[in-house]
Image (cartoon, helix red, strand yellow):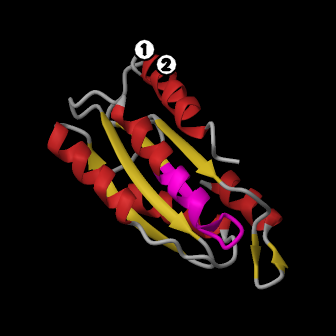
Amino acid sequence: MFTHYASQLRAACVGIMLVCTSAASAGPIDLGFLMDSSGSVGTVNWALQSEGFSQTIEALPRNGEYRVTFVSFASHADVIVEPTLIDSDATLASVQQAVADAPFLGSWTNTPAAIRLFMDTISSVGYQPDDHQLVNLATDGDPMLWFRDLKDETRTAVATQ
C-alpha cells in the first residue's frame, strides 16, 4: 500500500512548491499531513508512511515559506508536530525526528477527528481562509469508529473546513 509512497510524495511536494510559490500569500503555505495510525495500517506500513512523509518534507526550502503540521489518527487524533515553519536544517531535522518517534496507535479510523484537529491547530496560529493550504490525508480504509461508519461525518468535516 505505502511501498511507492515516498517517491510519489516527494515528487508531489516539488510540484506543490512550484504551484504555491506562483501566487502571493499573506502567510506561510500550510502543509498538513494526516497519518492513519489505525490497526489495519499495521506497524510496517506506519513506518513506511512516516518515512515517506519525512522524505517529502526534505524537499522543502528552509526559508520559512512553508509551515508543516502532522496529525496522527486512530480512534482519536493527536498532533505529532505543532505548526512549524521550516526555516532551517535544524528545524527540519526536529520535525523529521518527531514524525519518526510518533507511536503507532493501532485502533479504529476516526478520519473526521483528524481533519477537525488539523484545522483547529492551524487556526490557533493565525491561519486565514485566504492563505495557501494543502492537506495530505494518508489512509488505508474507510473511516470507522466502534463499528460506526464515519463517511458522512468525514465529508461534513471536509466541507465545513
At 53% across and 37% down in the image, what residue appears?
6
Residue, far bottom: 146
The answer for how far apart the CA atoms under marks 1 and 2 are is 6 Å
State how many labels appear: 2
Residue 95 is one of the magenta-drawn residues? no
Mark 1, residue position: 22
Percent across and percent down for residue 66 are: 33, 36
Instruction: Classify residue 145 as left or right of residue 105.
Output: right
At 60% across and 57% down in the image, what residue appears?
45
Q: Amino acid at mark 2?
A: Val
Percent across and percent down for residue 113 are: 60, 70
Percent across and percent down for residue 106 are: 61, 76
Whether residue 36 can be seen here: no
Instruction: Classify residue 123 as left or right of residue 153.
Output: left
Q: Secondary structure at mark 1?
A: loop
Picture quadrant of residue 144: bottom right
Q: Secondary structure at mark 2?
A: helix
Picture quadrant of residue 139: bottom right
Mark 2, residue position: 19
Q: Nearer the viewer, residue 45 or 8?
A: 45
Task: State the extent of the magenta-drawn residues as a range.
Answer: 33-50
For mark 1, does the 10 Å Cα neighbourhood hold few (<14), some (14 to 19), or many (20 or more) residues?
A: few
Classify the position of the C terminus by image quarter.
Answer: bottom right
At 22% across and 31% down in the image, what residue appears?
62
